Image: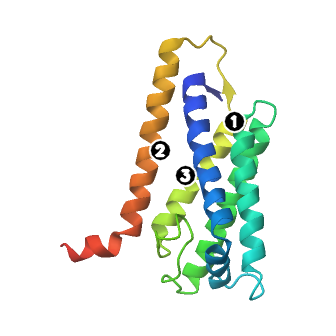
């Protein structure tokens, strides 16, 4: 599959930002995210903090790797694997009927319960990372206008991603407005 380099660069920037910011959140608040990991009940109780720090470091490294030409594909594949891990953890807990635990998707103050919408969001992230990892950028020179378009597209995609996150985390409040 061939992809325009403007689309590839814009999508790479967004995916790098999403995964790296998740890593920074976990590394800045390991106690909080350790409790979140423990709440999923997929690891032995008490292993959450170590797992959160390890996952946070891996997320940060994946985000940085996506930005480096030599490690771009590896970073995208690691990001896709992490998104798939989150998809599986959420799906298992939804299957257990556990919707009220914090997904750990945002900043510590942005508590968000588990939902099918999170599965859909992670599926889109997996598809984007895998698609980009195996896409062949079209060979064409990028000009100054392309740089403006990349910046605008990356900002628009990032704002859409953040808006979806805010809508999902505030769905209970929005339901009361009806």
Is residue 88 shown above or below 97? Answer: above
In the rendered image, residue 175, in percent from the top left (x then y), is placed at 26, 74
Circles 3 and 1 in contact, beta carbons < 8 Å: no
Judge the density around disc 2: few (<14), some (14-19), many (≥20) Cα neighbours within 10 Å. some
Q: Which residue is depicted at the point 76% across and 72% down?
A: 51
Is residue 106 shown above or below 49? Answer: above
What's the distance in space between the residues labelled 3 and 1, CA to CA? 20 Å
As drawn, the label of residue 137 is: none
Q: How is the image coloured?
A: rainbow
- State the SS at label 3: helix
Q: Which numbered disc, 2 or 3, marks the residue closer to the eye?
A: 2
Q: Do we see residue 23 in this rendering?
A: yes
Question: Residue at the left extreme?
Answer: 178
- State the SS at label 2: helix
What's the distance in space between the residues labelled 2 and 3, CA to CA? 14 Å
Pointer 3 or 1: first along the chain:
1
Lateral position of residue 161 relative to residue 77, left or right: left
> Which residue carries the number 3 mark?
124
Q: Quadrant of residue 64?
A: top right
Q: Which residue is depicted at the point 55% across and 29% down?
A: 7
Judge the density around disc 3: few (<14), some (14-19), many (≥20) Cα neighbours within 10 Å. few
In the rendered image, residue 92, in percent from the top left (x then y), is placed at 63, 78
As drawn, the label of residue 67 is: 1
> Which residue carries the number 2 mark?
158
Question: Residue at the right extreme?
Answer: 70
Q: Quadrant of residue 69?
A: top right
Q: Which residue is depicted at the point 79% across and 43% down?
A: 74
Q: Which residue is depicted at the point 55% across and 32% down?
A: 10
């Amino acid at each position: 599959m061939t992809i325009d380099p403007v689309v590839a660069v814009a999508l790479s920037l967004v995916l790098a930002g999403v995964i790296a910011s998740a890593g920074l959140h976990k590394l800045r608040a390991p106690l909080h995210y350790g409790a979140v990991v423990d709440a999923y009940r997929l690891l032995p109780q008490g292993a959450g903090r170590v797992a959160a720090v390890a996952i946070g470091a891996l997320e940060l490294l994946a985000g940085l790797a996506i930005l480096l030409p030599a490690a771009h594909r590896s970073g995208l594949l690691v990001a896709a694997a992490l998104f798939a891990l989150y998809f599986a953890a959420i799906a298992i807990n939804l299957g257990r009927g556990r919707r009220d635990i914090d997904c750990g998707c945002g900043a510590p103050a942005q508590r968000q319960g588990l939902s099918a919408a999170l599965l859909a969001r992670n599926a889109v992230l997996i598809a984007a990372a895998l698609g980009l990892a195996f896409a062949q950028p079209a060979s064409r020179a990028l000009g100054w206008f392309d740089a403006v378009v990349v910046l605008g597209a990356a900002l628009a995609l990032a704002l859409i991603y953040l808006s979806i996150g805010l809508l999902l985390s505030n769905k209970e409040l929005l339901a009361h407005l009806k």
